Image: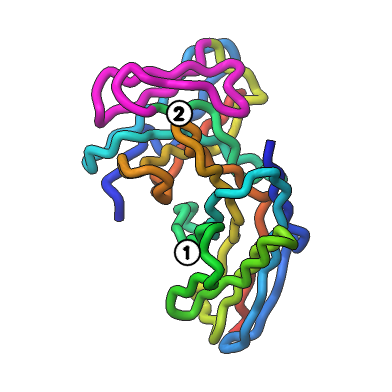
Amino acid sequence: DAGITQSPRHKVTETGTPVTLRCHQTENHRYMYWYRQDPGHGLRLIHYSYGVKDTDKGEVSDGYSVSRSKTEDFLLTLESATSSQTSVYFCAISESDRYQPQHFGDGTRLSIL
Amino acid sequence: AQKITQTQPGMFVQEKEAVTLDCTYDTSENNYYLFWYKQPPSRQMILVIRQEAYKQQNATENRFSVNFQKAAKSFSLKISDSQLGDTAMYFCAFMKQEVRNEKLTFGTGTRLTIIP
């Protein structure tokens, strides 16, 4: 298994609270991604990163921000969580060579009440 | 934007039988990559197989093979000699061959259940 750890694995919180999800990798891969998975939608890209302090928006980035201050860590923040952000969140990494497959973490189940 | 379509929401197959999962995609790109990922009940996303669009030869990985029809924009996955451990959601995914744009676009998935 690729060395990807997502934390927390589960979280329940209230609307309006800030939430930060962490993705930690031990592979020294350059590229990192955050997806959300919802029924009927498959996985959709939120934000991605090509390296330290190099991030870009994905398909569903509204309401989310990211930071990457170290190669191994990619943080996803919900500044003020809403019920529509209840989802399963996956982090993925891929090697620095282009067009390589992405390998996924085990996901974080986030519930916003 | 690319669109990936999986028209089979769920399938049931007897153990040891073969099964084919369908995927079509809509793109104007000529160079791209296609993937099948498997998500068992454990929720992990596991890469099953990868196909480069510039390769005419269909990719194979043990019991898993694809039928890639570039002109028809079709990318089906065949699982031979199915096993109980193949029970999972299967997602088809697309990646453009474009620098700094190595993002995956996923289909909505097919839930495959292998019956003993």
In the rendered image, the residue lying farthest to the right is: B7
> Looking at the picture, how far across and down is residue A22, in whole percent?
36, 28
The chain that hosts pointer 1 is: B
Q: Position of residue B73 (x, y in %)?
A: 71, 58
* Inter-mark Cα distance, 2 to 1: 22 Å
**Is A24 included in the stretch rendered in magenta?**
no
Whether labels 2 and 1 belong to a single chain: the reply is: no
* Residue linked to disc 1: B48
What is the magenta segment's predominant secondary structure?
Answer: strand
> On the picture, is A18 further left or further right than B16?
left
Tag 2, which chain? A
Task: Estimate the x, y position of residue A35 in percent, counting from the top left.
Answer: 52, 35
Coordinates of residue B19 in the picture (x, y in percent): 65, 78
Q: Residue at x 61, y 47 (%)?
A: B106
**Disc number for residue A16:** none
- Amino acid type, residue under disc 2 in the picture: Tyr
Per the image, label 2 sits on a secondary structure element best described as strand
Amino acid marked by disc 1? Val
| Residue at 45 percent of width and 42 percent of height | A107
- Can residue B38 be seen here? The reply is no
Q: Pick whichever, A97 or B40, lies toward us.
A: A97
The part of the image, by quadrant, that contains residue B47 is bottom left
Q: Is residue B113 above or below residue B83?
A: above
Q: Residues within 10 Å of mark 2 (few under 14, many from 20)?
A: many
Q: Which residues are magenta?
A: A50-79
Q: Quick check: A1 left or right of A80? A: left
Q: Which residue is mark 2?
A: A48
Q: Let me know if residue A108 appears in the view.
A: yes
Which residue is more in the foreground, A2 or B99?
Answer: B99
Badge 1 marks a residue whose secondary structure is: strand
